């Protein structure tokens, strides 16, 4: 039986495993390396802070997750299928590593985040079409 996410170290394990998997994917690697030009160590620390704050109310995350992804979308469109792949990969990693209430909360939160990003991107693209017509 797998354990649930219990602390920051568990989150670190999740985030590192997930990031390693994404960097093996051609599309996601392109986003990280070529488009966002992310310092991966800094990125991993920020993502750990984000999930630590979300799951344990640690107060460690400072930033605007939505703005970061919208800026990325302006550099290179984030397609709906990318968000779906991200969620599928995240859920697979979660299922491989953990089970329980916090793991379930992670899944629900990740889906909510992806849905909000998708909704904002769709709204931006709809406005862009209206302006260009």
Image (cartoon, rainbow, N blue to C red):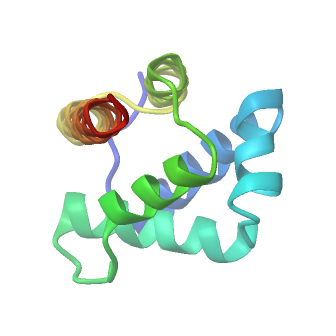
Is 80 above or below relative to 49? above
Give coordinates of residue 130: x percent, y percent.
25, 32
Give coordinates of residue 49: x percent, y percent.
40, 72
Question: Which quadrant would residue 64 be assigned to in this image?
Answer: bottom left
Is residue 4 left or right of 43 when viewed as pictured? left
Residue at x-position 20% and y-position 31%: 108
**In front: 22, or 35?**
35
**Residue 7 visible in rendering:** no
**Residue 47 visible in rendering:** yes
Question: Which quadrant would residue 66 be assigned to in this image?
Answer: bottom left
Give coordinates of residue 129: x percent, y percent.
34, 30
Give coordinates of residue 26: x percent, y percent.
83, 29
**In front: 113, or 90?**
113
Residue at x-position 52% and y-position 52%: 74
Question: Which quadrant would residue 38 be assigned to in this image?
Answer: bottom right
**In front: 35, or 99?**
35
Q: Quadrant of the C terminus?
A: top left
Is residue 121 left or right of 37 when viewed as pictured? left
Q: Total of numbered circles in the picture? A: 0
Residue at x-position 54% and y-position 60%: 12
Q: Quadrant of the N terminus?
A: top left
**In front: 7, or 68?**
68
Is 34 above or below relative to 104? below
């Amino acid at each position: 039986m797998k354990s649930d996410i219990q602390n920051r170290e568990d989150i670190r394990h999740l985030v590192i495993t997930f990031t390693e998997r994404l960097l093996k994917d051609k599309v996601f690697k392109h986003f990280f390396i070529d488009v966002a030009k992310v310092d991966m160590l800094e990125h991993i620390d920020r993502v750990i802070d984000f999930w630590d704050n979300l799951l344990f109310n640690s107060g460690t995350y400072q930033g605007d997750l939505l703005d970061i992804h919208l800026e990325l979308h302006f550099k290179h469109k984030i397609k709906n299928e990318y968000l779906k792949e991200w969620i599928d990969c995240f859920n697979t990693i979660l299922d491989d590593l953990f089970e329980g209430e916090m793991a379930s909360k992670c899944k629900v939160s990740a889906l909510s985040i992806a849905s909000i990003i998708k909704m904002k991107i769709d709204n931006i693209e709809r406005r862009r079409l209206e302006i260009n017509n």
